[in-house]
Amino acid sequence: MVKGKSMVSEEIELNHAAEAAGIGALESDMGEYIVQLAGEKPSHIIMPAIHKTKEEIARLFADKVEGVDYTDNVDALIQIGRNVLRQKFLEADIGLSGVNFAVAETGTLCLVENEGNGRMCTTAPPVHIAITGIEKIVEKLEHIPPLLSLLTRSATGQNISTYFNMISSPRKAGEKDGPSEVHLVLLDNGRSQAYADEQLRKTLQCIRCGACMNHCPVYTRIGGHAYGTTYPGPIGKIISPHMLGLEATSTMATASSLCGACGEVCPVKIPIPELLMRLREEAFTAPHADPAMVGQGAGYSWLMTSVWKGWAAVYRSPSLYGLATWLGSRFSWLMPSKQGAWTSVRVPLKPAGKRLRDMLRERE
């Protein structure tokens, strides 16, 4: 099976399931091919191998691709990948692809790509299997052009991608190419849960352009693999809890500065900061009956709730705040030298010896 780019197949770990069933699954998108060779997950939904340098890819190809010598020439590396993949397109029994938009009116599957591998894996093998989330279905063909324009401009800055494929049926009588069978798999995997809530359903507007990730100060500093989920960055923080449950993702919504950059650049106007606040509430408030999400309250702790209530009380009262800072500056030597995960890579936190108000008073 040769695969075009499909984050949904990553989401359900289709490659592992296929190989367990005795079906070899080869990624044909160049970035996906690179991370597959490396045994890694994509670090970006549009540019899967953006975390790798050309030297790292050169060493990977020299180690993993038979008969290939080390070269860090980018054109040569692309040609190596192309030579491997071209032969696989001819040999494959199945071509699998994702779907950017599926049109209910005509049964058309729309695929956006720049490399041509999507076109190859949907036409050369005798069987084409397309897999997509249920939120990618649009009602009419006339709805596609504005969505396509938003996707390409927001993802790569192009007016239109190099290839825009529209597949409405298998090969018909008299046609010389195309698969003899086309199958469409619609995936829920938590999407119905999001849709059931009027606020959370806005998550499903995502067209997977990656703009929120490119502007997120957290993602740009820690990279996609730090999230530990298929979808990293701001979109991953709001969609992964529906797919994996809040038990596994309760802390993801807190990995944000709430600067609002993701919401500002989102081409389909998903209010990501608002949804992050909602998910924090769902994760860290006490469990209750009839929850909106699986695992509601997974991050709740009576102790932490009490600590934060105490913190809020101190910060609401000028006199209590003044007392707390006075004690902190005078007794900073009581701070422990070991402060959990923080001191594994950083120096211990310690209050300053003088408060700002004391320093200002001395200057006056």
Image: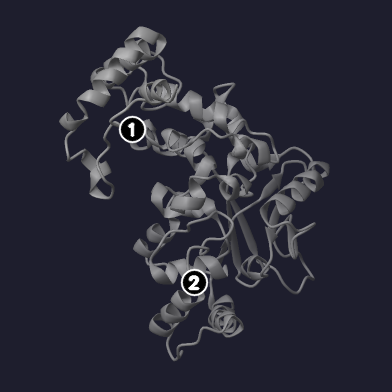
Residue 2 visible to the viewer: no
Nearest to the observer: residue 158 or residue 83? 158
Q: Which mark is residue 29?
A: none
Give the residue at x 59% y 83%: 79
Q: Which residue is mark 1?
A: 247
State which tag comes first along the sequence, 1 or 2: 2
Mark nearest the camera among 1 and 2 is 2
**Disc 1 vs disc 2: Cβ atoms closer than 8 Å?**
no
Residue 225: % across, % down: 42, 54
Q: Quadrant of the C terminus?
A: top left
Which residue is identified by label 2?
Answer: 53
Residue 179 image position (x, y, % from top left): 65, 66
Q: Residues within 10 Å of mark 2 (few under 14, many from 20)?
A: few
The amino acid marked with disc number 2 is Thr
Residue placed at 46% from the left, 34% from the top? Answer: 242
- Alpha-carbon span between mark 1 and mark 2: 35 Å
- Give x and y (percent) for residue 19: 38, 64
Q: How is the image coloured?
A: one colour
Q: Residue at x 45, y 50 (%)?
A: 230
- The answer to whether residue 139 is seen in the rendering is yes
Number of labels in the image equals 2
